[in-house]
Image: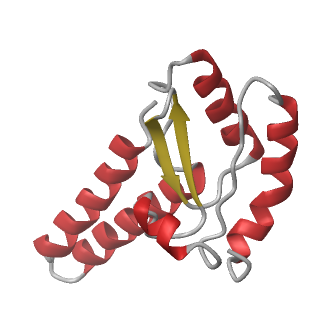
Amino acid sequence: APHCAECRAMQPDLDAVASEFRRRVDLEVVNAAEEPDRAASMNVLGTPTLIGMRDGVEVARFTGRRSRAELRALFASIEGGNTDGISPMSRGDRFVWTFAGALLIIVGLLLGPSWILVGLGAALAAVAVVGGRT
């Protein structure tokens, strides 16, 4: 979408990786602002959303900006037919979730302790670990 700063920032990397995989992996860009019905039919809830398809079946889905290396890995996995090693969370997302979890644990321990905050922090950190598995 034109209003999406993350989409605009990722576009040069996406174009570069798409050109590397030209004729082996097709790239189709859907502008969610211009085609809201199509985006809704694809269950796009946020931008940027990357949906990897193989033989008409969705094999990977990511929401949020991805690095060039992550995009290259996605394209290679789709080309090879194996997306098991692709993490649904970007490195940046994993860092933010881990940092937030650690911060909640520290604040929870300093405030009493507040086991609710400690538990929430542990849950956030766990999501980062589980979501970051490849």
Q: Indicate left or right for 59 with 101 as reference.
A: right
**89 is higher (above) or lower (below) than 17:** below
Picture coordinates of residue 21 (x, y %)? 80, 29
**77 is higher (above) or lower (below) than 80:** below
Which quadrant of the figure contains the N terminus?
bottom right
* Residue at left offset 48%, top offset 33%: 56
Q: Indicate left or right for 33 with 45 as reference.
A: right
Please state which of residues 15 and 39 is positioned toward the viewer in this rendering.
39
Q: Indicate left or right for 84 with 73 as reference.
A: left
* Residue at left offset 69%, top offset 41%: 71
* Residue at left offset 39%, top offset 71%: 103
Please state which of residues 42 and 51 is positioned toward the viewer in this rendering.
42
Name of the residue lying farthest toward the left = 115
Picture coordinates of residue 107 (x, y %)? 31, 77
Q: Indicate left or right for 25 with 100 as reference.
A: right
**88 is higher (above) or lower (below) than 123:** above
Where residue 133 sits, quadrant-wise, is top left
Picture coordinates of residue 2 (x, y %)? 74, 78
What's the image's color scheme? secondary structure
Picture coordinates of residue 51 (x, y %)? 53, 47
* Residue at left offset 68%, top offset 77%: 4
Please state which of residues 50 and 129 is positioned toward the viewer in this rendering.
50
